[in-house]
Amino acid sequence: MSRLVPPPSFLRGHLRTILAVALFALLVHDIFGNHGFLAMRRTQKEIQQLRQEIQKIHAENRELDGQVKALKSDPRMIERIAREEMGLARPGELIFKLPPPPAKLDPPKK
């Protein structure tokens, strides 16, 4: 007599397919998800840009610090600022301020 073998359950019959789909879903999530590979690369690029900006600002701060020190101690720098920006003069000097040259008008086009 032949024994009837019950058909395999749905889970047992499709286990490989279910595992493959689950692994594929995890892979897609790891690449394209909110904290996936692409998001990580984007964040790394932003960090690199911010580091470059910080270095640029540090260089600008060093330059401004040098200017501040010069303004505090360099008499020539102080005099230049007083003359150019504040319009001051030494005793006995006269300051002549000329009006800006008139703007040239473009000749009419024919």
Image (tube, rainbow, N blue to C red):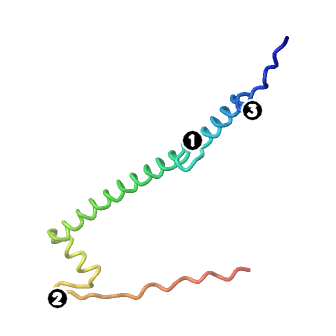
Q: Residues within 10 Å of mark 1 (few under 14, many from 20)?
A: some
Residue 13: give x, y in percent of width and height: 74, 28
Q: Secondary structure at mark 2?
A: loop
Q: Earlier in the sequence, mark 3 or mark 2?
A: 3
Q: How far is disc 2 from disc 1 in space, using C-alphas?
A: 78 Å
Expressed as whole percent of the image width and height from the top left, the position of residue 35 reads 52, 47
Q: Secondary structure at mark 3?
A: helix
At x 50%, y 46%, the residue is 40
Which residue is rendered at x = 69% and y = 34% of the image? 18
Residue on which the image places disc 2: 92
Which one is in front in this view, the residue at disc 3 or the one at disc 1?
3
User: In this figure, which residue is indicated by the disc labeled 1?
Assistant: 30
Tally of numbered discs: 3
Residue farthest along the right direction in this orientation: 1
For the residue carrying disc 2, how many other residues have a C-alpha within 10 Å: few (<14), some (14-19), or many (20+)?
Answer: few
Residue at x 26% of width, y 83% of height: 86
- Label 3, on which residue? 10
- The reply to whether callout 3 and callout 1 are in contact (CB within 8 Å) is no
